[in-house]
Image (cartoon, rainbow, N blue to C red):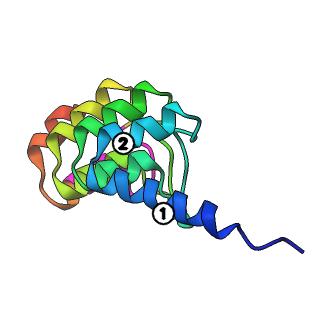
Amino acid sequence: MSEAPDPEVVELATKIFDLARQGRTEELVAYVDAGVPADLTNDRGDSLVMLAAYHGHAGAVRALLARGADADRVNDRGQTPLAGAAFKGETEVTKALLEAGADPAAGTPSAVDTARMFARTDLLELFGAS
């Protein structure tokens, strides 16, 4: 039988996930620099990079990647940060992820499939796909 999580830990984690969603890069990386894992995930498997990417915060994405976060970490639904950025049409986030080596073919649906689905031809060009 597992113990219930410490409410203070849950509150801190919630705050950190909110910082990623809001693109509050300085505060977010202060926590990572202090020891919070760069690949911290929530109860749906969304990483800090996924949350920052989906909400269009290229600076936060770059800062997390520079601190060792995985650009291709999939969530519980098989989605990658790059596919999330493609879904939202976030060109700068897409570029940041690609610069870090994110794979446009990773995940389900992949970023390429997502860009095709939503006719994001500018992103398909970045992926080298058509």
Is residue 108 visible in the rendered structure shown here? Answer: no
Quarter the C terminus occupies: top left
Q: Is residue 108 rendered magenta in the image?
A: yes
* Mark sitting on residue 27: 2
Q: Nearer the viewer, residue 121 or 28?
A: 28
Q: Residue at x 55, y 48 (%)?
A: 40
Q: Residue at x 57, y 41 (%)?
A: 36
Judged by depth in the image, the label closer to the viewer, 1 or 2, is: 2
Q: Which residues are magenta?
A: 104-115
Please report whichever mark, 1 or 2, sits nearer to the chain's N-terminal start. Answer: 1
Which residue carries the number 1 mark? 14
Please name the amino acid that badge 2 sits on.
Glu
Q: Residue at x 40, y 45 (%)?
A: 49
| Structural crowding at the residue carrying mark 2, measured as other residues with C-alpha within 10 Å and reported as few (<14), some (14–19) or many (≥20) | some
Q: CA distance from mark 1 to mark 2?
A: 14 Å
**Do labels 1 and 2 touch, CB within 8 Å?**
no
Q: Position of residue 113 (x, y in %)?
A: 30, 53
How many marks are shown on the rendered structure? 2
Query: Callout 1: helix, strand or loop?
Result: helix
> Can you name the residue that lies furthest to the front here?
8
